[in-house]
Amino acid sequence: MNIELKNVTHKYGSYVAINDLTTTFNEASISMILGPNGCGKTTLLKYLINHCEEYGNSMAYVPQETTGSLNTTVRDVLSLGRYNKSKFYIRETAEDKRIIDEVIAEFGLEDFLSRNVDTLSAGEKQRVFIARAIIQDADWTLLDEPTANLDVKYADKLMRIIKDHRSRGKSFVIVIHDINLASLHADNILLMKSGVKIASGAPSEALTLTSLKSAYDIDFISADIEGHKVFINSVGN
Amino acid sequence: MLKLRDAATGIKIIISLIVLVVVMLISCCLGSVRIPIPDIIKTLTNSEEISKATRTIILQVRFPRIIMSALIGGSLASIGAVMQGLFKNPMADASVLGISSGSALGATIMMVSGVSFSVFGITGNYLGAIVGAVVTWLIVYNIARISGDYDLNTTLLAGIAISSIFTAIITVIMTMNKDRLEQIYLWMLGTFSNSTPSKTLIMSIVVLILMPILIIIAPRIDVLKLGKEAAKGLGVSSSSSSAILLTVSSILLAFCVANSGIIGFIGLIIPHCVSFMRVYKMRSKLIMSFLVGAIFTVICDTIAKTVAAPGEIAIGAITSLIGAPYFLYLMLTGLRRERKMR
């Protein structure tokens, strides 16, 4: 089922974070939300997860950063992805174990399963927490800047994994800063500014020089490279 | 691999249980009268060979106190584990909620008011401590949900503020009632010497009801560590889970403080010791913290009552004197290990 937001407004006190937003996130596709800092991207993701009862119960969420000491092993964190599959969460079933092992292999986490999460680097942590969300096997997975701490290789690997899960009918809503990554991998784009929608639709429609200029207040230039549209901000012009 | 790890935790729990029983038996031997272990076992199996006096010492004096110290040490350690997990802060323990200060205030007021009664072993101080704790928790809890949803950070700040207000009031009461100074001060230092069979029975029932609740919902703490929204996706509400966990912990703590006064350090260090034993999952961690906390406290109390016999050293002093150096040792070896890995 698609998620249809109609005239959603969200405030923090008197500050309006999302202002009268109407948009649709399609099922079995990758939707990416772009926009300048503080434009309401993260608030929108939190809005979705906090209203997950209305939009279908099954949602997984990974914040930009998981703060504080977790003081537990990587394997234990991954296992939490199966928490809501059993009533008292006493032990992993064979099915749980199969799914966890699959995702461990997908993300290449074999080498640090027994390490304490607190001792991992930011990028390693991010891979673990995203893997945890994939293990949850929810219909919708919401990721807040999943590639922020990842190097090019792992960012690419993550996109492959996400596309693979989309082809199995899973839906993703991803907040991202990299315009070209979005242009290359997203099925749908939502471009925001100050809590308001600037543009939405397929990357080719939503990401234009005009829409980007009005979202970020800077000039962009674009080029076609092997059929892909690439944007660069024209520094100093 | 997972099964292996589960089994390892199981073995650690069984070993701790055995150690606890042994420590309790040894503690029962020691005291102003030394009683050999076979006599203790004979008493427990209701053998007729044991003199009435010995039987009374074991059943009416030593066992209630040993069981009480085990129950309270275990509870304090488990509550500490809950706090550290929930607040994601290694420095958190039961004292951050202000409950201990509330209990102390309640007990202090009863001590200076001169009201004294005893029903089924329950004295005025005891009741004052429970009421003080419950009132404190209600204040902190209601401040923490003032913005609508129950909030953990507000809990922490409100708890610390309330705690310092109450401590100040106790100081004022103490200076105004110099004749009761010693009684209040000794109560606050903590002791198990007031344990009676009936009090121990009540504490056992409280632990038997509340600990299973904590153990059953403990995995929610693991889930909450992922963040409020991620937990929501897994069907765990941060506000209601925190409210349940903290309320249960507060009631348990209220009974601990009512029985033994304020005993520091157990709630802070034992969960760390359990982490050093590589037990991380909250459910196993709570069980292990309970057992290790119980062992530690029984040992400390045995020292407290034997070293300066027939007098006693305050249990709080012993837990810190033994606990703090051990904690430093664990921390230093941990740091050294980390440096080697780098």
Image (cartoon, helix red, strand yellow):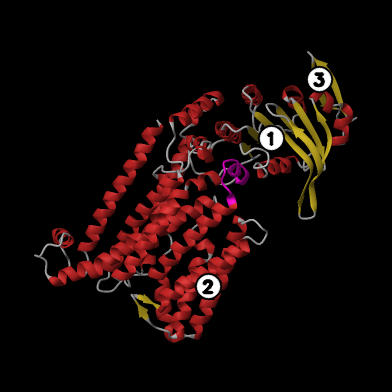
**Cα gap from disc 3 to disc 2, whole angstroms:** 67 Å
Residue visible at 48% across and 62% down in the picture: B250
Query: Is B234 included in the stretch rendered in magenta?
Result: yes
Q: Which residues are magenta?
A: B227-238
**Residue A4 at x, y percent in the picture:** 75, 36
| Residue B206: % across, % down | 39, 62
Judge depth for marks 3 and 2 and give the one in front: 3
Q: Quadrant of the N terminus of chain B?
A: top left
What residue is drawn where x is 64% and y is 33%? A140
Q: Secondary structure at mark 1?
A: loop
What residue sits right under mark 3 in the picture?
A229
| Crowd around label 1: few <14 · some 14–19 · many ≥20 (10 Å) | many
Three-letter code, disc 3 = Lys
Q: Which residue is mark 2?
A: B167
Amino acid under disc 2? Thr
* Residue A192 makes an appearance in the image: yes
Q: Is residue A157 above or below residue A211?
A: above
Where's residue A149, x and y in %?
65, 33
Distance between mark 2 and mark 1 Cα atoms: 46 Å
Residue at x 21% of width, y 64% of height: B30
